[in-house]
Image (cartoon, rainbow, N blue to C red):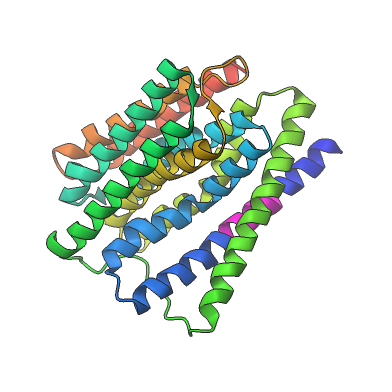
Amino acid sequence: MVVFIGLVKIVLGFVLLIKGADFFVDGASAIAKKLGVPELVIGLTIVAFGTSAPEAAVSLSAALRGNNGISIGNVIGSNIMNVLLILGLTALITTLKVKRATVRVDIPVMMGATIIMVFWGIIGGTFTRLTGIIFLLILMAYLIYLFWYSKHGEEDDGEGDEIKDLKLWLIPVFLLGGLAAIIFGSDITVDGATEIARFFGVSDRLIGLTIVALGTSLPELMTSVTAARKGSADIAIGNIVGSNLFNILFILGMTSVLIDLPYMSDGANFFIDGFVALYAAALLFVLVARRKELGRKGGLLMLLSYVGYFIYLLINM
């Protein structure tokens, strides 16, 4: 009965997280559109943050409750899934085109953020307030670059999600309603995952890296697969890269500003997982650097890599 109730909570929490993120993104995008913010900036910031909102809510909620393994595991597990599993699946559907700026700037920045996360965690053992401040400063610099690029970079090809033109009175309803669903959904998800972990004696780390990471990655999965099926496959990689950047720089940054997050400890050792996340980022760069696209062979290699990592997790349960 404990497991059943826990699973019900996780499923209900995921539904609230995903729908809440949808409403929040629609509301925030509508505000940006009315203020004249370029659609490129909206896509790489608000939409990326929106698809990362479930990870943010779950990680903050878990950290404040002392479930640090779920907090960091959720971010690392989501980043691994986003690249190896989601992009792998999407690339099997259709070849993914990649913008030149994504290869030259966005993916390298994601790799750099992952390197800082991994080696800071290994050397320091804990993400502290200083870690969080540095992550947030890097994010601020990246956002400034995005705004500059929207004014001086390549022309936007117009592809991507259509921004809803909401009536003015509906915008706060979407924003507040979406935010409430995200917060409530995160609480339920963490409760359910924690109950299952305790019942089976599974660590918070493993739950965060698998069940919670999969659930909070559903927005990225739906966005990328839908984009591929609609013929807008070139936005899939941009969405994933933007989401992964927000996961590290904003979620871990904001969370570690509020509370210390152990990276290397008996209950939450992310040594191998961090390097898998770094491998995923490097693999993506290598596969798209020359031809500016991710084909089916690359997607298959990503999927096989994730299968290997998942087997490692099962062996080390």
In percent of width and height, residue 91 lies at: 33, 45
Q: Residue at x 59, y 68 (%)?
A: 176
In the rendered structure, which segment of residues is drawn in magenta? Answer: 11-19
Residue 74, position in %: x, y? 54, 36
Asked if the stretch drawn in magenta spans residue 17, the answer is yes
Judged left or right of residue 166, residue 2 is: right
Q: Decide if residue 4 is in sight here.
A: yes
- Assign the magenta stretch its main secondary structure: helix
Residue 56: in magenta span: no
| Residue 79, horizontal then vertical, whole percent | 43, 37
User: Residue most toward the right?
Assistant: 1
Q: Residue at x 68, y 45 (%)?
A: 189
Q: How many marks?
A: 0
Who is closer to the viewer here, 97 or 53?
53
In percent of the image, x 41 and y 74: which residue is there? 31
Left or right: residue 271 compared with residue 42: right
Name above or below for residue 265 compared with residue 251. above
Indicate whether 60 appears above or below 76: below
> Quadrant of the rendered structure where residue 124 is?
top left
Which quadrant of the figure has residue 146? bottom left
Quadrant hosting residue 33: bottom left
